[in-house]
Image (cartoon, grey):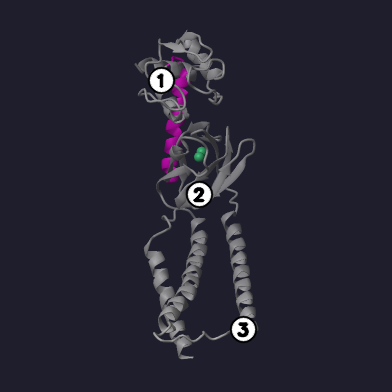
Amino acid sequence: MRHFIVVAILIILSSFLVYAGISAAHLLPIEASLQSIPIDWLFRIEFVAISFLFSLIFVPLVYSLIVFRRRSGDTSDGQHIEGDTRLEILWTVIPLFTVMGLAYIGAQNLSAIRRVDPDAMEAKVTAFQWAWKFDYPNSGVSSNELHLVVDRQVDLSMTSSDVIHSFWVPEFRVKQDLVPGIVTDYRITPNLIGNYKVRCAEMCGTSHAYMEAPVIVQSQADFDAWIKTQQEANAAAEASGIPDASRGQRIYETSGCRACHSIDGSPLVGPTWKGLWGSEVMLEDGGTIKADEKYITESIKNPAAKIVKGFAPGMPQFNFTDLQIADLVEYIKTLK
Ligand code: CUA
């Protein structure tokens, strides 16, 4: 009986120590969404269970090794023990109810996380190898940065233009796949102003590890101001009608071009843009072509038309306007 009491006290003590250790390790990033609160609560329950189960196995093991070790000169057999029905019932019933309880809490948690707010802001997310594009259909703004309003739910309709990607902002906790051909739904209510990062959490090719984009959670006023700036820039471009290299640079940076085309000569998935303008491009079919306006325009509109030697066809179709393509050409001209 004395052994049982000592071991029980040691198990409780060890559980507290292990849980304190797990907590001190700060395994979870900061909570930046309403949905992260119930998720972290569930995580903490699991941490308590893990600490207890670890101690329940480890403490009796170590205790037995030390207290019941074989003394020198003792060559007798160990005590022979047959099964114990009470014990077997106990260690079947307790885990059964524990797991059922966790399933119940998990289901409740899931419904809390997926609660739909009818006033949610809407935005679209498109993933492609290897970048993110965010569209705000109500204001006609597109960006490679995701801007969100603090304390306001956002409903992201997500899809992919090539392979499966996964939208993951660790501080928001919730994660959702983007699948070509279907639209998936992701709801989140950011509740902490700050700058975060969306990462791709599904292995999607060579640059998977670099598939990141900024996520900015800001006040409604700051968000409105950002939308207005974007709209004004778009309107100014349309009004002038004259191709412009700096606008081309913005398209390069925000529409995903830079994921595959470098501007410093380094090789990526696609040919570099440095020194491209006016050069003689070697093609896969053995021919060459001068990189002029006609060739670059065709390569953007119909990427498979001419494949550069040493590269595989695979560039996605972009729906650029003629002016946007002209802007890109102007930008490429500056990359000597
Ligand atoms: Cu996209 Cu990994």
N-term-proximal mark, 1 vs 3? 3
Give x and y (percent) for residue 21.
38, 67
Callout 2, which amino acid? Arg
Rounded to the nearest whole Å, what is the CA distance between mark 2 and mark 1?
Answer: 41 Å
Of badges 1 and 3, the one in the foreground is 3
- Which residue, given by chain and number where applicable, does mark 3 sit on? 82
Rounded to the nearest whole Å, what is the CA distance between mark 1 and mark 3?
Answer: 77 Å
Give x and y (percent) for residue 323.
49, 17
Which of the 4 image quadrants contains residue 266? top left
Dominant SS of magenta comes to: helix
The residue lying furthest to the bottom in this view is 1
Mark seen at residue 152: 2
Tell me what residue is drawn at x 42 percent, y 69 percent. Answer: 19
For mark 3, does the 10 Å Cα neighbourhood hold few (<14), some (14 to 19), or many (20 or more) residues? few
Tell me what residue is drawn at x 57 percent, y 36 percent. Answer: 163
Q: Element at badge 2? A: loop
The magenta-colored residue range is 219-243
Tell me what residue is drawn at x 40 percent, y 65 percent. Answer: 23
Mark seen at residue 273: 1
